[in-house]
Amino acid sequence: MWKVIIADDEKLICRLVETLVDWKSLDMELAGRAENGMEALELVRNLHPDILITDIRMPGCNGLDLIRQARELSPDIEIIIISGYAHFEYAQTAIAYGVGNYILKPIKQDELNETLQKIAGRLRKNQLNLPGIKSVYRNSQNDLKRLREGLVKDILDGNGNLTAEELIRNYHFHIEDGIFQAFLLKIDCDIHKIEEPAFSIIRRKAEEIFQSTVASVCIESLLGFQEYTGCGILNYPPENKDSVRYRLREFLQQLEACKNLFGKVEFSLGLGKYTEEADGLVRSAEEARLAVEERLIEGCGRMLERIPQSSGVQKQILLDRYVKGIEHAIDVLDAKEAVRAGAELKTTVMAVPDICGREILDIVLHAGKLLVLRIGGSYAEKIQYDFETGCRQCSKVDDLFCELGKLQENLITELQKSKENETTRPVRLAKQLIMENYQRNITLDEICEAVGFSSAYFSAMFKKVTGEGFSKYLTRVRIDKAKELLRETNMPVSEVCEAVGYNDRKHFTQTFHKATGVNPAEFRRLYG
């Protein structure tokens, strides 16, 4: 039997959970109860439970700390979190830890039992008794999963036409005569804030809802994911057309109803046209992609089917104008100029009558590509990939142009640093040569020959970077070294004079007095 632990500082909640569940029918036993996080953690350590049901807020060790430490003790433990509406943000954090089972107070018996039934199903799949059978089962499931993932990739990549025979033979996709249709579930989020553990929960939730809504009216169906896009493949009887549309809407509505748990996430569903032949699935998926890109204008949380006509926007003219503006910004290294170029592009694009989402996305992606090609440097490929990934995760036009703005700012900032380095490198080299040779008669011409510039150009560059001329800088270095020797050694002033590059003691004394206000002997008496 599967062992269950309940952790809640309210005894009534513990008793309620205990009485609401028919443990025997689920092949489960209530192995322990805890009134705080520390007690629960001790039970996890000693009893090795399969399931932990915990409140989010408890004294001693709160639910989030308990979840994290329980995961460390038992990585495969299934966790159900209990949360009140007032503590929704805690549930979001738990999801980030990879916990996808959550129940809101007041606890409903049907919801609790349904959640436990799903967990029991997963446990049965993951912990078959016979190692040999378990291995065979796991391998067969992994093989099927890889095949289905391959099917999703092939359809999203538009790899040719998939015949009915290929679906059956190559992907083990059971089909019958009827309707074939593809849809895309687009999940827009900040990929830097919603990382893989949390996103795996979103995928699993989407798959669960899909199975309970859409799959039940289909002959065969599949929902698979490639990055942040879910691809649905449906085969259903012709008489179920209306039911499928209704169930797809219900699928999206249920995802929308629980999206706040996941953080800042937006769902949109693009529906391709149905076809009576399996080889039309690739085309249907492409139609779904074009439809779902209209969320940029229509908004998220919708089932999108319409593919608007192209507006006839003169993309190349707009991009040429943008490039001209951005070239000037690059020439003068002015981020504000780049902002103006981006803002002008946005204004011009949005003024085009009947412009559609896919056209806006295409223009922004091309603008970014042109910018990266111009100043991307050695990391251009990665910068381009990150930019395109960010754009494809945008759910609004404003967010799309914000991505372009960030790209402009980052590239111009990097270019500014690069230009500064080009200017300061010879100056840094000159400073190094001065520090290594100040004790002898080093000259400006000698330094210029070492760094490869004319004396006139280098003198101007040196003063711009350091704020003082070469001779003044060399004198300061020598006097600072002389002060150090006068303070820390007993060297005679005449030896100090020679040690810092002066052959004439009188000239050294005059220079030292001008810089410090006292002569070398007086400096030693005051500070030595």
Image: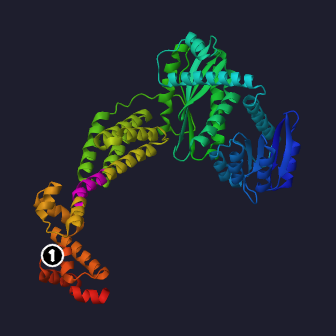
- Choose between 8 and 472: the one closer to the eye: 472
On screen, residue 399 versus residue 31, left or right, reads left
Res. 354 visible in picture? no
Name which quarter of the figure residue 221 lies in. Answer: top right
Q: Residue at 47% x, 22% y: name it.
A: 158
As displayed, is residue 187 above or below residue 458? above
- Choose between 491 and 232: the one closer to the eye: 491
Place of residue 262 in the rendered image (x, y in percent of width and height, measured from the top left): 62, 45
Q: Mark 1 points at which residue?
A: 502
On screen, residue 330 versus residue 306, left or right, reads left
Q: Which amino acid does label 1 sit on?
A: Tyr
Say few, some or many: other residues with alpha carbon within 10 Å of mark 1 (under 14 / 14 to 19 / 20 or more). Answer: many
- Choose between 5 and 251: the one closer to the eye: 5
As displayed, is residue 425 above or below residue 283? below
Place of residue 363 in the rendered image (x, y in percent of width and height, measured from the top left): 36, 36
Range shown magenta: 415-427
- Choose between 164 and 518: the one closer to the eye: 518
Per the image, is 176 magenta? no
As displayed, is residue 441 above or below residue 522? above
Name which quarter of the figure residue 499 lies in. Answer: bottom left
Place of residue 195 in the rendered image (x, y in percent of width and height, measured from the top left): 56, 43
